[in-house]
Amino acid sequence: MAHLLAPANVMAADDSPQALYQGGMSRFVSGDYESSITYLEELVKIFGREPELKEHVDLAMYARACALYNLGRHAEAVKAFEEYIAQFPESQFVDEGMFRIGSSQQILAAYDLAIAAYQKLTARFPRSSYAEDALYQIGVCRLLQEQYALAAAAFQDFMRLHPNSPLWGQAGAFCARALFDDIKPAESIRVLEIIEKKPRTWSVITYCNFLAFEIGDYLMDDTDYELALKAYRRVKPRAALLRHQGNHVAALEARLAAMSKTRPSMHNIRSVFQEERRLAADLAQAREMAEKLENLPDYDANLFHRIGRCFFNTDRYWEARVAFTRVVATAAEDSVREAGHFDLILALSRLRRLDDLLIEADAYLATYDPSGKWE
């Protein structure tokens, strides 16, 4: 077994196919991708067309392409995977290779090429687990291209075809985003309602939270108060989200650290690429959502002020009173508290609650006009 883990200068001493294969693969499975490429390229260059070495060359070409991908040399990785698939079209790793081609093009921002690669994969291997990820990434590419109608359609197809996928909730959130950006707020809210019926990660919940707030503001400005209320009701308190999102980030970091320690063996080199890629994407989004929450002032009072205005503008003064009362009690900013207090007085006036109106009017003047300038 000692000869399988040859020293780094083995290539200079022994350029046999076995030595090149073992030297390259041992370094690949240990994570030394840069060094592994030298051995694997030499093996393929010299012995790539030898029939009796077909199995070794198959694995070597796959490992070399993966090493290039893992090193971030994505343009080279695309070429390496294409050469590998052309030479071994029936290999067990072809579906992964096709997905990595699309992923590399996506990282390079060549979105049309990425979509074409993903579509080729889903057509040839519709039952592959990579086909599931490919369809999801088609939607992501469309969203990045600002092709919102096509993005929404791709995510809707994904949700229909893969209802049990761990990516289902995020696909729904991105679908809602695409529909809203396509100026379809009512349809966007319907998608948010649908994905609420299934368990979601805290990253998805937080993403939908920001989107619902944005939709509500758009609809309120458009004076569609009933639909705005429907959006605002999906917004959760910042403190609760911040606490849960912090725990979610820590859990994902621990899972990714444990996965990073897992290496393929010489006898089973199929990587944990798919799981690791999903987990890394989840962690990146979780960190983004946590940072956004951290940098955002507490919005709870502003939210209830908006909800109160929607109720007020639809003649539901009692509900408006409750919302404005909460604004007065919780607002940290004086301007928000004053606006909420003024609107509370208006709501009490519409309700003809004269005793309460006088009490709140006196409190308002005592707080915001202690010198009596307004009298």
Image (cartoon, rainbow, N blue to C red):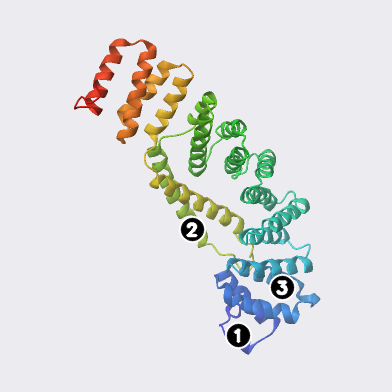
Amino acid bearing label 3: His
At label 1, counting other C-alpha atoms closer than 10 Å, the crowd grade (few under 14, some 14-19, many 20 or more) is some
CB atoms at circles 3 and 2 under 8 Å apart?
no
* Most distant residue in the right direction: 51
Secondary element at tag 2: helix
Q: Which mark is residue 56?
A: 3
297, 353: nearer the viewer: 353
**Residue occupied by mark 1:** 10
Amino acid bearing label 2: Ala
63, 309: nearer the viewer: 309
Q: Which mark is residue 21?
A: none
Secondary element at tag 1: helix
Task: Where is residue 214? Give x, y as percent.
Answer: 50, 37
Task: Where is residue 58? Give x, y as percent.
Answer: 73, 70
**Residue occupied by mark 2:** 258
Q: Relative to residue 16, is residue 224 drawn left or right?
A: left
Between marks 3 and 2, how big is the CA–CA gap?
Answer: 30 Å
CB atoms at circles 1 and 2 under 8 Å apart?
no
Would you identify the image quadrant in which residue 86 lies? bottom right
Q: Earlier in the sequence, mark 3 or mark 2?
A: 3
Between marks 1 and 2, how big is the CA–CA gap?
Answer: 32 Å
Q: Residue at x 58, y 56 (%)?
A: 277
Q: Relative to residue 336, is residue 254 drawn left or right?
A: right
Q: Earlier in the sequence, mark 1 or mark 2?
A: 1
